[in-house]
Amino acid sequence: MARVLGLDYGTVRVGVAVGDEQVGLARPLVTLEARAGLLQRLRELVQREGVSRIVLGRPLRARGEPGTLDGEILHLADVLRREGLEVVFQDEGGSSQRAAELLRVNQSRRGVRGARDTRRSRQDGELDRTAAALLLQEYLDSLADPAGLPEGGAA
């Protein structure tokens, strides 16, 4: 069984999701602080979850050029590869917005109102790990339909 971690990297928090290539489903896992100790926490998750690959979100702008965090994301990918992990990229453009919309819909179904609960979702990292799950799910979906893999999706 090939387990995969999805990472939605940010300067403050890193959303983490886990998925299975055979089953083809991703789920939010945890949100980590993007600071010293991040690599050690990722090592622990890789070990605990039995991960063989990391899918790292890489936001691309509308014209396909790299986003503002591209240098940091590429550095993280290099560090993870030196750890012996396979790293592939998945365009995460808009994943945070899609995650926020998904959380709003779920909250309205539960009868929760407005901005206060959305702010809480950001503060507790729910938004980050949901965004990670969405980008990982897109990657897993592309495995089921290899022709659907966007250009530059794998590295």
Image: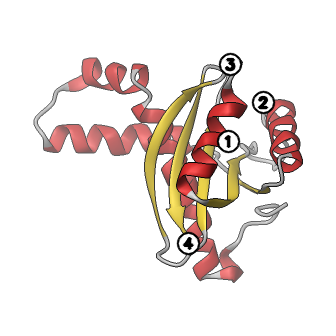
User: 105 or 140: nearer the eye?
Assistant: 140
Residue underneath mark 1: 43
Which residue is depicted at the point 44% across and 47% down? 28
Cα distance between the residues tagged 3 and 2 = 15 Å
Which residue is depicted at the point 55% across and 72% down? 141
> What is the crowding at mark 4: few (fewer than 14 residues within 10 Å), some, or many (at least 20)?
some
Amino acid residing under circle 1: Arg
Question: Can residue 31 be seen here?
Answer: yes
Cα distance between the residues tagged 2 and 1 = 22 Å
User: 38 or 92: nearer the eye?
Assistant: 38
Residue underneath mark 3: 35
Q: Secondary structure at mark 4?
A: helix
Look at the image and tell me in which quarter the C terminus lies: bottom right
Disc nearest the viewer among 4 and 3: 3
Disc nearest the viewer among 2 and 1: 1
**Quadrant of the rendered structure where residue 151 is?**
bottom right
Cα distance between the residues tagged 4 and 1 = 25 Å
Residue underneath mark 2: 69
Up-down relation of residue 92 to residue 14 (above or below): below
Up-down relation of residue 68 to residue 60 (above or below): above
Residue 118 lies, in percent from the top left, at 32, 25
Q: Secondary structure at mark 3?
A: loop
Which numbered disc covers residue 124?
Answer: none
